[in-house]
Image (cartoon, rainbow, N blue to C red):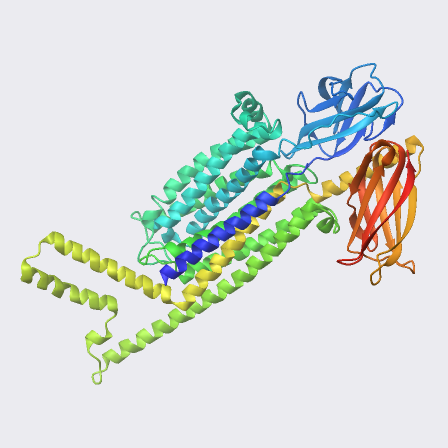
Amino acid sequence: MTQTIAPRVRTLVLLILAVAGALLAGAAPASAHAALTGSDPAQGAVVDTAPPQLSLTFSEPVAVGDDSVRVLDPKGERVDKGDPANPSGTTYSVRLVSGLPDGTYTVAYQVVSADSHPVAGAFTFSIGAPSETTVAVSAQGSDEGLVGWLYGFGRYVSYAGFVVLAGGACFVLACWAPGARVRAVQRLVVSGWLALTAATLGLLMLRGSYTTSGRIGDVFDLELLGDVLQTKTGAALVSRLLLLAAAALFIAVLFGAYARTADAGDPDRAAESDGGEPDKRDLTFGLALGGTVVAAGLAASWAMSEHASQGLQAGVAMPVDVVHLLAVAAWLGGLTALLVALYRAPVETPVGRDAIRRFSRLAFGSVVTLAVTGVYQSWRQLGSWSAFTDTRYGQLLLVKIALVAVMVAVAFLSRRWTQRLADARVSAAAEGNERAEEEKQPAGTVPAEASETPKTSEASKAPEASKAENDAAGQDSVRAAQLARQRAAAEAARQKRLRDADPNRFGLRRSVLAEAGVAVVLLAVTTVLTQTEPGRTEQDARAAAATSSSASATGQGSGAVSLTMPFDTGGKNGKGVVSIDLDPAQAGDNALHVYVEGPDGTPVDVPEVKIALTLAAQDIGPLPVAPDRIATGHWSASGVQIPMAGDWKVEVTVRTSDIDQVTVSKNAQIG
């Protein structure tokens, strides 16, 4: 049975790791957690005279450096001077060279948001009139590429290490004291400590390159490392390393003095220590208190430097985030320890039903805690129901909620298997008592040899076998010891086969393994969530950008352009009218709305709508635009860049089925 299970376990673990890796690899680069909400001059604006300075406004405070903001003229030469200044709040300004000539200027910025994530972007504005040439800047931020991937992987490993370290130790202290003696459990907890320590050191080394150049060669730049140590994130990472030193002492005591109090003969209880029950209770209480303090400190190193430390109610959000992380560790880390115990615990120290029941209660309390703290965090990070579907953060949160629901369902199955296992043991005990009563009867009793358990039979045969060996050939004591070890190993293997053959235990192991597999994917989604821009921030940035675009359009005195085009794809229900609204219809940023109506004028949904803009006179385009669906028959795209004024051809492709589509077009004067 064991030989059959092991390949399945390895295959499932490899599959889980592949899914987690795909989630991490397929995740978009870390979005800006502080968004650019405005600038002066505005994005795409055309100003009459050269401004003395450029101002950028973000949704939250950011950290700026010497080269955080660069302004390039049409030839690619820098025209900014001095370091960025912070005159007020979330606005940052940089002085410009005086007497700038007419043309289009490119602004590139790269800063670090208050929740530790890099923010990069670029836009253009023009003086006098747009120029024919502009400067192209790289769209790749420092958080992309190899350094960004390594940093994201390091974050995942650090979360996993914390969960295994804190949750595994909690499982031993709260649920299964004899587990402190089990080598597999010891290796699990120590591996969590090593993973968290290595990942923290790696993040500390990568941090400088991650927030500046993005080059792998800068990872070992000591000057950058010194700058990182002066930041909030650097201080949090150093604090985490100091707490890990205290965690190492905790592990030494847990698997040293505490392990010696565990009674190997009773898998669900801890025996008294040499100094008596009070000494054992004092040791357990001290470990529980010290472990809780260290675990809370480790969780606070995340809470004080990331999402929870910024935005609404930061003073409430940080302790809530600490409690949330501790509940995650107790549930997922304890589940991992339980899985290891079910598969790797020795026969003489099996994990009993009482330990499983205690963990079941611990997991239930953790899930309730996660639900309460998760609701608060969701409200704080999203702010509206629409953010669940309109933002990437909300979509990932829906995936996380679904995975938690699956884990709870599988945990319910595990609870049923635990109950069946307990019922089976009660039945076996009752049968044993009946046999004992029958043996006491004076008549009709069975021979003692027939009622002995296999273990007792082996024990009774041991003296006879030993005597026969001594009488037969004068076997020496070394040979006798070898035979004894062989018999003990054979007996242990037999007991293990009997244990693994129990269908209730086998079902429990499978359900716990499935639950742990979902937990690995859940942890990967959580890691991606921490690197994604909160939905509330994303929606606020969109609203601010729309307001800025509207104000810019009003200042330039231009109105919107509306185009109406009938279409007929030739298929069933393929006729209708598509309308295009472009506002403010100027060079620079524009908001585009698409409306599709049927012949009777009612809004209708179609599978796909695509837009392309072409300025044939200047050989520009077609510039593709992929609008997002807003409502029935309504699509929208913000930030549509029109490079220059002219007679633009607007093409609309409407697809009404898998094979039926048509492209219609009209010309419009823009600018």
Q: Is residue 584 visible?
A: no
The quarter of the rendered structure image containing the C terminus is top right
Q: Percent x, y for residue 286?
A: 42, 43
Q: Percent x, y for residue 291?
A: 46, 43
Side of 495 relative to 403 (left or right): left
Front-most of 572 and 586? Answer: 572
Q: Residue at x 52, y 49 (%)?
A: 18
Q: Residue most toward the top?
A: 98
Up-down relation of residue 518 to residue 127 (above or below): below
Q: Residue at x 25, y 70 (%)?
A: 453
Side of 468 relative to 655 (left or right): left
Up-down relation of residue 543 to residue 579 (above or below): above
Q: Percent x, y for residue 187?
A: 39, 45
Side of 228 relative to 276 (left or right): right
The answer to which quarter of the image holds residue 33 is top right
Side of 220 relative to 105 (left or right): left
Q: Residue at x 55, y 32 (%)?
A: 236
Front-most of 501 and 667? Answer: 667
Q: Residue most toward the bottom?
A: 443
Q: Is residue 569 visible?
A: yes
Q: Percent x, y for residue 174?
A: 44, 52
The quarter of the rendered structure image containing the N terminus is bottom left
Front-most of 170 and 79? Answer: 79
Up-down relation of residue 270 to residue 669 (above or below): below
Q: How many marks?
A: 0
